[in-house]
Image (cartoon, rainbow, N blue to C red):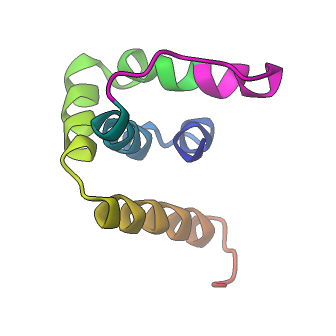
């Protein structure tokens, strides 16, 4: 879901990295919507190759797939911090 939120905020690059990491753990994922609440985020994730271009998506996806669990958590945390700084939110 964090990856979908990043896409919605106009930052598909880190979303592709996170998607790569998830698939490195679980294997290729088929979009599954548990409810209508998840329909749009699922669509955003499946459109990453179109949004970024196939080559850039593959590169970013592969970098996520190569990350450790600790690495992806640090990456996700940095994306959240970057977004907060971008909007002028105070550090928590």
| Residue at x 31% of width, y 37% of height | 20
Instruction: Classify 4 as above or below 91.
Output: above
- Please give left or right for residue 82 compared with residue 14 in the image: right
Residue 53 picture quarter: top left
| Residue at x 45% of width, y 37% of height | 12
Residue situated in front as seen by the camera: 81 or 86: 81
Residue situated in front as seen by the camera: 78 or 11: 78
Instruction: Classify 10 as above or below 68.
Output: above
Q: Is residue 76 magenta?
A: no
Q: Is residue 38 magenta?
A: yes
| Residue at x 36% of width, y 19% of height | 49
Residue 45, image x, y percentages? 51, 26
Work out which residue is located at the far right of the displayed protein and give it: 36
Give the tally of numbered discs: 0
Residue 25, image x, y percentages? 32, 40
Tell me where the magenta segment starts and ends, as one range: 27-42
| Residue at x 19% of width, y 22% of height | 55
Instruction: Classify 74 as above or below 34.
Output: below
Residue 35, image x, y percentages? 79, 22
- Please give left or right for residue 28 compared with residue 6 in the image: left
Instruction: Classify 60 as above or below 75.
Output: above
Residue 29, image x, y percentages? 42, 22
Residue situated in front as seen by the camera: 87 or 80: 80
Quadrant including the N terminus: top right
Quadrant including the C terminus: bottom right
């Amino acid at each position: 879901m964090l990856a979908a939120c990043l896409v919605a905020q106009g930052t598909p690059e880190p979303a592709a990295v996170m998607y790569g990491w998830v698939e490195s753990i679980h294997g290729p994922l088929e979009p599954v919507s548990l409810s209508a609440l998840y329909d749009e985020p699922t669509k955003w994730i499946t459109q990453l190759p179109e949004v970024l271009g196939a080559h850039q998506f593959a590169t970013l996806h592969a970098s996520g797939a190569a990350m450790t669990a600790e690495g992806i958590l640090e990456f996700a945390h940095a994306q959240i911090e970057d977004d907060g700084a971008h909007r002028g939110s105070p550090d928590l």
